[in-house]
Image (cartoon, helix red, strand yellow):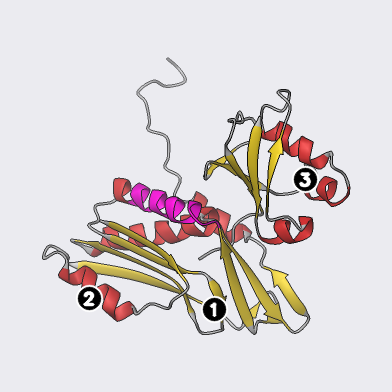
Amino acid sequence: MIVVKVQTDDFDLSAEIAQLRHSNGAVGAVVSFVGVVRDLNDGAAVSAMSLEHYPGMTEQSITTIVEQAQARWSIFDALVIHRVGDLLPLDQIVLVAVTSAHRGEAFQACEFIMDYLKTQAPFWKKEQTPTGARWVDARVTDDSAASRWTQACVENNSTIDD
Amino acid sequence: MELRILYFARLREALAVREEQVEVAASVSTIADLRAWLSARGGVWAHEFAPERQLRVAMQQQVVDADTCLVAGAELAFFPPVTGG
């Protein structure tokens, strides 16, 4: 099962993990990631952040990313909660939680979902700094992180000498 | 054809437009054509839609590339590279 929520409200990590754990007796591993608002970015103090998104496309793009994870790894359930609106330093921004029988699949799927979410899901962050508001720039490192999940082409049997 | 266009984040602020309905001639048939058509408005539009500006485009809420054909009545969206998570 895939659950994707885009909301202004905060979330309770313990409650969400407990719900995932109780849903299926075959779950041996729950892997989770929480993204948090920092008080410093790109050399400037951040006093507040706001998150804009594209209603409709946001939920669909995250669901598509999670479906890709389900196709690549043996996972049971996946939950993504992403907050929007006004946030403060130390606030939770996003939760990605994945369940599986064993930890390897869940760890990889969770990281994959986050790497793709960072480069594909239509959210935009604006932060308040001492010199005023500024839109956060996309990071090259996020694109690099996402590209490492690109699967190598399936080798065929022919060689250059054929 | 008629199109609905949405603008997000820094782009929306720069253009001072959140969304609009437009009517484009048949010669505007691809995403690239639409981008050029918007750029031709001049001023801040020419600046924001210049070829070197990094923009993403979605049609019917799916990311598309420059040579995708426009669909009549579709919802288009232009936005900067995303920064969620």
Q: Is residue A78 left or right of residue A120?
A: left
Front residue of A108/B20: it is B20
Measured Cα–Cα span from mark 2 to mark 1: 24 Å
Q: What residue lies at 42% left-to-right and 22% top-to-bottom?
A: A159
Front residue of B71/A122: it is B71
Front residue of B53/B45: it is B45
Q: Which residue is mark 3?
A: B49
Which amino acid, by three-letter code, is at mark 1? Val
Could you classify mark 1 by the number of other residues whose Cα lies within 10 Å: few (under 14), some (14-19), or many (20 or more)?
many
* Circle 1 SS class: loop
Number of labels in the image equals: 3
Measured Cα–Cα span from mark 3 to mark 1: 31 Å
Q: Which residue is mark 2?
A: A18
Which amino acid, by three-letter code, is at mark 2? Ala
What is the chain identity of the residue bearing mark 3?
B
Q: Is residue B66 visible?
A: no
CB atoms at circles 3 and 2 under 8 Å apart?
Answer: no
Please provide the residue range marked out in magenta.
A54-69
Q: Which mark is residue A137?
A: none
Q: Quadrant of residue A16?
A: bottom left
